[in-house]
Image (cartoon, grey):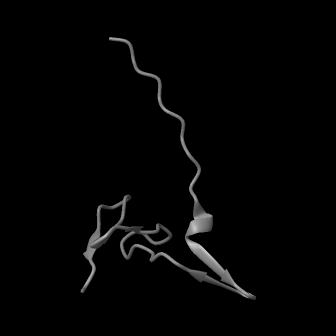
Amino acid sequence: MAKKPKGKKHPAKLWKAYKVEGNKVTRVKQFSPKAQGSFMAEHKDRRTCGKTGYMERKGK
């Protein structure tokens, strides 16, 4: 079988992970504790790391 062509890679949207307020820059998303420098994805009831598979449940 012929190999399928790979899809285009999309750049990371890092501007959504930070918030600028006046002269300060703050992080909106959390870093993963297992893979430093990798942001965790925000879901409705949990946070997950796509690199390591680490998952945290959000409290009520």
Say whether residue 35 is left or right of residue 25: left
Residue drawn at point x = 52 percent, y = 78 percent: 28
How many marks are shown on the rendered structure?
A: 0
Q: In the rendering, at what x and y percent does residue 33 appear?
A: 37, 76
Q: Nearer the viewer, residue 37 or 30?
A: 30
Question: In which quadrant will I find the C terminus?
Answer: bottom left
Q: In the rendering, at what x and y percent does residue 36 appear?
A: 46, 72
Question: In which quadrant will I find the N terminus?
Answer: top left
Residue 31's place in the image compared with 38, above or below, is below
Residue drawn at point x = 58 percent, y = 59 percent: 13
Res 54 → quadrant: bottom left
Q: Residue furthest right?
A: 23
Residue drawn at point x = 56 percent, y = 45 percent: 10
Residue drawn at point x = 39 percent, y = 18 percent: 3
Q: In the rendering, at what x and y percent does residue 25 appear?
A: 66, 83
Q: In the rendering, at what x and y percent does residue 17 appear?
A: 55, 70
Say whether residue 51 is left or right of residue 39: left
Say whether residue 44 is left or right of residue 13: left
Say whether residue 48 is left or right of residue 11: left
Res 27 → quadrant: bottom right
Q: Nearer the viewer, residue 23 or 32?
A: 23
